[in-house]
Amino acid sequence: MSNSSSIRHFLLLALADTRQLQLLHFCLLLGISLAALLGNGLIISTVACGHHLHTPMFFFLLNLALSDLGSICTTVPKAMHNSLWDTRSISYTGCAAQAFLMFFFLGSEYFLLTIMCYDRYVSICKPLHYGTLLGSRACAHMAAAAWASGFLNALMHTANTFSLPLCHGNALGQFFCEIPQILKLSCSKSYFREAGLIVVSAFLGFGCFVFIVFSYVQIFRAVLRIPSEQGWHKAFSTCLPHLFVVSLFLSTATFAHLKSPSISSPSLDLSVSVLYSVVPPALNPLIYSLRNHELKIAMRRLMTGCFQEH
């Protein structure tokens, strides 16, 4: 019997058993991370440099890109290191930091997606009040609230989880430090305290989900009343990317944590965890840039200007 004070490191789930597959996974993760860094970095640079993009929609998109960068930089570098050097170890402190940062960035992203839904709702359903409801100060306050909520939520869960005594070894069934996996190692009845925090977070998350669904019902009702085809196209070009990103985020995360144990297997669990933690940060910039004509033009101008300078 050992407790958390005697555990100095955790063993993460290996991505592969053979050396060839480990190197293949390293190359795949390198490609995905470079795509995420390039795509999100390009969105951040484009919105920051393009003065005509200093609107609420693109301001929140910039914050979303920052959260995507943070989440992929939290998990992928360590996974690449382990694949390249054929190891599974992560220090106790590193595991706590990784769990906190992952919870922080994913929570902040979910709150930001909810705020972006509100932005689209006001833009389409209450266009005359857009400037009043979404002024620069209001946008800054909402973004700050999203980041602060993600931080406090992550801090509570991480502090509580790593205060529990652990006596079921140090092997985690995940390729990064995830709080549900660490709770499986606990031997204390005080894990019910963490279960209470999870229930509170679940209610908060469900409230955001209900708000998103209600908002999009109102948005689609308003869009269907638009007489011109051009109006339809403009409305859908801003709403569909957000809807795709929300669907990808919620479907992968929900399936990863709520799937039936009867269909669970190490390979499936690993694939699903990669889908919800690694793939969305790389796909989100592509989804937004493909559907948003204004953003595509601004990106093209930025890249053309950079090439001309060199």
Image (cartoon, rainbow, N blue to C red):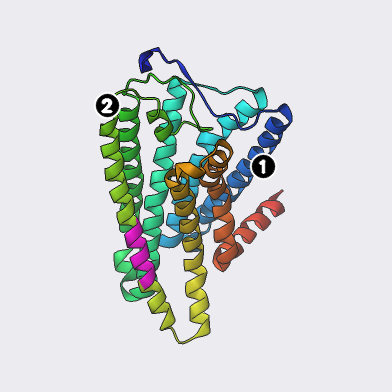
Query: Within 10 Å of the Cα at label 1, are there few (<14), some (14-19), or many (20+) other Cα atoms?
Result: few
What is the CA distance from the residue labelled 1 to the residue labelled 2? 43 Å
Quadrant location of residue 154? top left
Task: State which region is magenta.
Answer: 209-217
Reading the chain from its start, which is encountered first: label 1 or label 2? 1
Determine the residue located farthest toward the front in the rendered image: 262
Dot label at residue 31:
1
Q: Is residue 62 visible?
A: no
Judge whether 177 appears above or below 5 on screen: below
What amino acid is at disc 1? Gly
Dot label at residue 189:
2
Q: Main secondary structure of the magenta part?
A: helix
- Report x, y in % for residue 287: 56, 59
Residue at 50%, 66% in the rendered image: 240
Left of 34 or right of it: where is 122? left
Q: Is residue 247 visible?
A: yes
